[in-house]
Amino acid sequence: MKLNKKLLASGVLAATLFAGNAVGAVSAEEAAKLGKSLTPIGAEKAGNGDEIPAWDGGLKQAPAGYNDDGIYVNPFPDDEVLFTIDQSNVDQYAENLSAGQIAMIKRYDDYKMPVYKTRRTATYPQSIMDETVENATSAQLIKDGNGIGNYQNATPFPIPTNGVEVIWNHITRYRGGSVARNVGQVTPTTDGAFSVVKFQDEFTWRTSLEDFEPDKDPNVLFYFKQVITAPARLAGNVLLVHETLDQVKEARRAWVYNAGQRRVRRAPQVAYDGPGTAADGMRTTDNFDMYNGAPDRYNWELVGKKEMYIPYNSYKLVDRSLDYDELIEAGHINQDYTRYELHRVWHVRATLKEGDRHIYAQRDFYFDEDTWQASVIDHYDGRGELWRVAEAHAMQFYDQEVPWYAIEVLYDLLSGRYLALGLTNEENDPYDFGVERSSREYTPAALRRSGVR
């Protein structure tokens, strides 16, 4: 087996570091489909002969008007709405929608889904695609799916054979190596009133550290730091996470700095259904980035692939001329600024294991085949009732060759409230890719410096 030289220096663990049976790698014959009938990431390269086009390499060139400043302009300003899905015709399109999307349309008279031409803009740097192809015959699930071995910095399972492989593709997907963001989060009341919580957050993959050492902290996948900058009552509070790859072997390391108390403490509740930061009870910790963390509390069923209308190329939602008062409405965001397209998705169902606890007893995930990002997730409570609906309004960060989210929304069908995270319209310097960070900046000792008001 030929392994890339970065295999053991990739920020994840080799299979030999784990006990337990290893499964996952596909045959060389299967892997040979990558780059041919399949894209290098594992999507079907061909279109469907109708609405979904063939993948032609994705959007790699910035459009006119982009100033290389992290203020993303719409590369498709002349695209028009083909049709709109609303209460008058939702049943006609039901087979291409999730149960949660249908429920949102039926709950709100003014909720609609404007559908546009499908554009397969997703792409990654060539090195990431090359490493994905190598992962296909080497990456393996270990510890009953709670870790990955023989894996390097790319999609581990481009040809998945089970549901937990798909969830790992989402968790480990490439987001630029290191990036800093200035974003807002809102949790409107039922009448639409809101205040904005503002964050400075950073994701840095271990291999992107300035002082990266292959043998140092090999179970860490990435480092995450989040500083609240507004409102004043919360400003200065900091969350630090060392995201471990095998969180059963070693739980996620998390610390919080409370600016009022000027104190750093461990935060074991930053996992699973622990409360999300400053979210007013509207999301769990593992709702961030649509889903994150250890997969061990759920059974993961790969239901299959289907065509579905999902949020895509959502550049209108980051338009600098759009302010938060125009975007945030009662019950849901202003759907006039959304864009839905027909894409193929992987459907994965997560059901809570007997004896484990979580406020969500079942989740139905729909992952975009071109990116492995979760696009829509329906959440069910312990009674089996549909409770919350998450949508990720995705876009291609074309100057970085990074697919990611413009904003994430999580709708609560029972309370009529929701959370929107990742807002950038009114934020300065919303995205900074390629930030230089060292391991010293992601230590508990560094938290107090980050949290001074």
Image: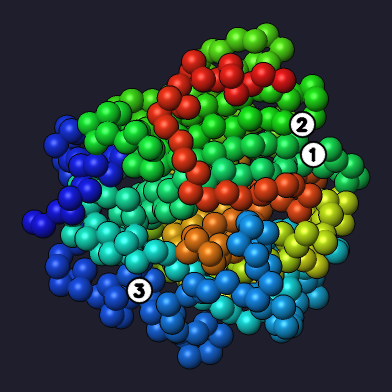
Per the rendering, the mark at residue 39 is: 3
Tell me which numbered mark, 1 or 3, is placed earlier along the sequence: 3
Horizontal and vertical percent position of residue 286: 53, 38
Element type at mark 1: strand
Residue 399 visible, this angle: yes
Tell me which numbered mark, 1 or 2, is placed earlier along the sequence: 1
Left or right: 82 in relation to 9? right
Which residue is located at x 61 percent, y 44 percent?
Answer: 181
Horizontal and vertical percent position of residue 96: 58, 72
Residues 393 and 179: in front is 179
Please, is residue 269 above or below residue 54 in the view?
above
Left or right: 238 in relation to 436? right
The type of residue carrying mark 3 is Thr
Asked whether the residues under the numbered discs 1 and 2 touch, taking CB atoms below 8 Å apart as contact, a structural biologist would say yes
Please, is residue 33 above or below residue 18 in the view?
below
* Distance from the alpha carbon under mark 1 to that under mark 2: 8 Å
Q: Quadrant of the N terminus?
A: bottom left
* Distance from the alpha carbon under mark 1 to that under mark 3: 40 Å
Per the rendering, the mark at residue 230 is: 2
* Distance from the alpha carbon under mark 3 to that under mark 2: 42 Å
Within-10-Å neighbours for mark 2: few <14, some 14–19, many 20+? some
Residues 48 and 198: in front is 198
The type of residue carrying mark 1 is Val
Which residue is located at x 39 percent, y 48 percent?
Answer: 172
Outermost residue, left side: 1
Tell me which numbered mark, 3 or 2, is placed earlier along the sequence: 3
Which residue is located at x 89 percent, y 42 percent?
Answer: 193
* Circle 3 or circle 2, nearest the eye: 2
